[in-house]
């Protein structure tokens, strides 16, 4: 995503020779839609964001199945695993991330999967059609999405989460408990605060052993335990690397002719790992490469999730543990809805909405515009308050 977005922006500049090196044998496809492909909601062709003609029309040379093995900053060259050398004036590292595999014995057993590539999706889709019981290790966004898909195959599905509640990066505990209740209603089994000790089997997975000693029967196990930035190429090149490839406001690395964006990049000690950040960083990097830096200042994190009629939205600093912050909540147990906003100095800094996302666009706009809601903060979450009207008023921060 970051690579193609940057190349698209750069292609508008006449005279630039653009090349994308990709280790995978496929043109850019949407990783977030892989679970939809597994479910059969979209076709394989619908995964691909651009066809081959688009790259030709935009003068983008795409080299597929060619892994970048060595970067030589002094020579401004990239060598691939096959020995081919590519020269550059500017280089963008959009190397993405890889699944984090915790040190759990049994990962190599047949029936154990991660979901990152199209090949992973193909394998899961095929295997799920003959499975009966599935365990998803990790109750994050992807874990819940794929759990719903496996449920649709008729499997009994258990989600295991080590944290005290689901989606600890996107929800507070109250919102997460409501989500858990809703997920149980559609048939998912949810276990939080549990640790996996081993995946057991004789060639094929049979059980998941918990640290408590309990065993869960499973013939399909999917690990969804987060990602780690792909930084090997940057380390080899001698660039500054922390959790990701460290970049400045122009997305430049410690080598001024090399940039980084997307899941591989770390800005202000943060690796975002989300789509909005990848897009914003790619465009900012492209602007800097062409000599017109706009300056990247970070991305306001936001999350949307829809699982069989259950919708949630979170944005910004929603925990409410910052100094001077006020927290406002609204819980409708009858209709199973939850709303929360965090306000500081009259401005919303974060929000959570569960099963009630009609307000998401309005709240997002208020956050981005830094509108002062001091006069309305006690009513803004009530059913009677029209947030759309508020976003069009001229209430600005003093």
Image (cartoon, grey):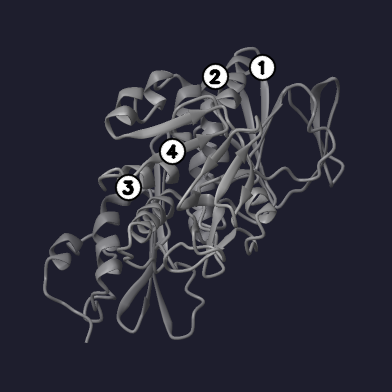
Residue 334, percent from left and from top: 38, 50
Position of 215 relative to 322 (above/below): above
Q: CA distance from mark 4 to mark 2?
A: 41 Å
- Quick check: can you spot residue 264? yes
Residue 92 locus on image (x, y percent): 48, 50
Which one is nearer the viewer's eye here, 329 or 70?
Answer: 70
Q: Of marks 4 and 1, which one's residue comes earlier in the chain?
A: 4
The correct choice, above or below, for 228 with respect to 147 in the image is: below
The residue sitting at 25% across, 81% down in the picture is 374
The answer to whether 90 appears left or right of 142 in the picture is left
Asked if the residue at tag 3 contacts the one at tag 4, i.e. Cβ–Cβ closer than 8 Å, the answer is no
Mark 4 vs mark 2: in front: 4
Disc 3 versus disc 1: nearer the observer: 3
Identify the residue at horizontal 43%, vertical 68% (top origin).
249
Q: Which mark is residue 381?
A: none
Asked if labels 1 and 3 touch by Cβ distance under 8 angstroms, the answer is no
| Element carrying mark 3 | helix
Q: Which residue is mark 2?
A: 153
- The spot of residue 95 in percent (x, y) is 55, 45
Q: Earlier in the sequence, mark 4 or mark 2?
A: 4
Question: Upstream in the sequence, badge 2 or badge 1?
Answer: 1
Which residue position holds label 3? 10
Of the numbered discs in the image, which one, if any, rests on residue 19?
A: 4
* Direction from residue 24 to residue 46 in the image, left or right: left
Which residue sits at x=28%, y=75%?
A: 377
Residue identifier under label 1: 131
């Amino acid at each position: 995503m970051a690579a193609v977005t940057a190349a698209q922006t750069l292609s508008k500049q006449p005279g630039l020779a653009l090349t994308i090196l990709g280790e995978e044998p496929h043109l850019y496809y949407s990783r977030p839609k892989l679970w939809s492909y597994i479910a059969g909601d979209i076709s394989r062709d619908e995964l691909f964001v651009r066809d081959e003609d688009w790259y030709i029309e935009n003068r983008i040379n795409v080299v597929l199945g060619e892994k970048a093995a060595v970067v030589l900053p002094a020579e401004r060259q990239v060598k691939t695993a096959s020995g081919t050398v590519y020269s550059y004036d500017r280089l963008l590292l959009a190397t993405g991330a890889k699944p984090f595999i915790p040190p759990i014995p049994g990962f190599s057993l047949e029936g154990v999967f991660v979901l990152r590539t199209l090949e992973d999706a193909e394998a899961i889709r095929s295997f799920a059609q003959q499975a009966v019981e599935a365990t998803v290790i990790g109750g994050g966004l992807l874990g819940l999405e794929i759990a719903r898909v496996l449920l649709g195959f008729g499997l009994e599905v258990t989600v295991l989460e080590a944290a005290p509640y689901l989606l600890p990066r996107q929800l507070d505990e109250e919102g997460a408990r409501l989500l858990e209740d809703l997920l149980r209603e559609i048939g998912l089994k949810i276990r939080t605060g549990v640790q996996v000790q081993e995946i057991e089997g004789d060639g094929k997975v049979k059980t998941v052993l918990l640290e408590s000693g309990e065993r869960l029967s499973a013939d399909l196990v999917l690990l969804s335990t987060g990602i780690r930035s792909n930084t090997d190429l940057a380390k080899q090149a001698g660039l500054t690397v922390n959790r990701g490839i460290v970049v400045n406001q122009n997305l430049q690395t410690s080598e001024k002719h090399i940039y980084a964006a997307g899941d591989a990049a770390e800005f202000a000690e943060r690796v975002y790992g989300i789509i909005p950040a990848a897009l914003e960083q790619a465009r900012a990097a492209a602007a800097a490469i062409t000599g017109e830096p706009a300056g990247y200042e970070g991305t306001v994190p936001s999350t949307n999730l829809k699982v069989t009629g259950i919708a949630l939205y979170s944005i910004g600093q929603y925990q409410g543990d910052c100094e001077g912050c006020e927290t406002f909540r609204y819980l409708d147990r009858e209709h199973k809805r939850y709303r929360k906003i965090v306000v500081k100095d009259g401005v919303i800094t974060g929000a959570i909405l569960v099963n009630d996302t009609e307000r998401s666009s309005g709240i997002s706009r208020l956050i981005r515009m830094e509108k002062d809601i001091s006069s309305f903060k006690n009513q803004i979450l009530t059913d009677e308050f029209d947030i759309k009207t508020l976003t069009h008023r001229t209430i600005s921060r003093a």
